[in-house]
Image (spheres, grey):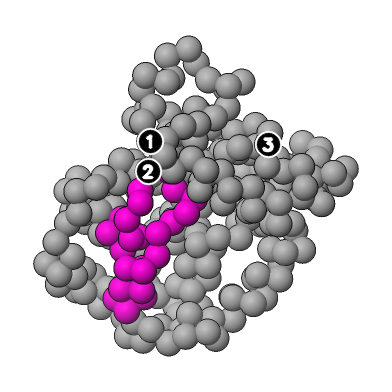
Amino acid sequence: QGPDPSLVYRPNLQPSNAKDKTTFRNYEGGELHDRVFNTYRLMHTHQTLDFIKQKHIQWSSCSHAKLTMMEAIELLDKLVDESDPDVDFPNSFHAFQTAEGIRQQHPDKVTGLMTRTLFQDSIVFRDSTFSENPDFKQSAFSSEYGVYKPNCGLENVTMSWGHDEYLYQVLKFNKCPIPEEGMYIIRFHSFYPWHHHGDYMHLCDDKDMRMLPWVKEFNKFDLYTKSDRLLDAATLRQHYQQLIDKFCPGVLSW
Ligand SMILES: [Fe+2]
């Protein structure tokens, strides 16, 4: 396990030596700070339970586009992730960097290419960005369990809406033959308060605990392979096309 990637903005959780070690997921300074803070503020203000339910209805029917997986990855050439304090280049490069990092250490694993109410302290910018969210003031959501039962399983928890859940829904809808661990990693890899800080354990069931090591392992590559050294995408495309043909074949509904 590398240095804790997201302690910096949570002084209450921060060990005295954390700053020296932390260079990724630094939410405190850096030239991208304003862009990142603003993205989190918008997310934490508008992602209410109702909003998320509406996004599920809107997107989980996968009726928006027909694209192969490689065409979808190519669309990421135009996208820079505004929530990410570490990168300022298109997300398609990040996809290939992650996949290559995994390939070097786990030649047999392939998940890398595709890749929260009960407001706990480990959420990024938690103290400064939730005040305008209507759910934040609702007592039903602010207890330890909120609207959930103990150990109900994360698959039964409504997570904030984002690329994780969307890609999971797309792959499920298209019946892609991806192993259970891969599907789980895709769905929960951004849930840092859980997989990195150990929060929300009281909602987890046996499956979550079985899957946790996989999510942690994936996270090393998702995070620490980000760098400005960009790989030759044309060469990589050739290699990954074979894996796509096996695990996400043909034209998919998005
Ligand atoms: Fe991601």
- Circle 2 crowding by C-alpha within 10 Å: few under 14, some 14–19, many from 20: many
Mark number for residue 24?
1
Label 2: element kind: loop
Q: Quadrant of the N terminus?
A: top left
Q: Percent position (x, y) of residue 254?
A: 48, 80
- The answer to which of marks 1 and 2 sits earlier in the sequence is 1
Name the residue beneath numbered marker 3. 128
Name the residue beneath numbered marker 2. 86
Tell me the kind of residue under disc 3.
Ser
Tell me the kind of residue under disc 2.
Asp
Give the CA separation, mark 3 to mark 2.
21 Å
Give the CA separation, mark 1 to mark 2.
6 Å
Residue at the extreme right of the image, as rendered: 139
| Magenta stretch encompasses residue 73 | yes
Left or right of 78? Residue 210 is: right
Left or right of 92? Residue 183 is: right
| Magenta stretch encompasses residue 59 | no
Residue 240 in sight in this render? yes
Left or right of 198? Residue 88 is: left
- The answer to which of marks 3 and 2 sits earlier in the sequence is 2
Contact, mark 3 vs mark 2 (Cβ under 8 Å): no
Q: Quadrant of residue 85?
A: top left
- Circle 3 crowding by C-alpha within 10 Å: few under 14, some 14–19, many from 20: few
Contact, mark 1 vs mark 2 (Cβ under 8 Å): yes
Q: Percent position (x, y) of residue 2?
A: 34, 30
Residue at point 47%, 85% (across, down)? 65
Residue at point 48%, 12% (across, down)? 16
Distance from mark 2 CB to nearest ligand 1 atom below 8 Å: no
- Circle 1 crowding by C-alpha within 10 Å: few under 14, some 14–19, many from 20: some
Q: Which residues are magenta?
A: 69-94
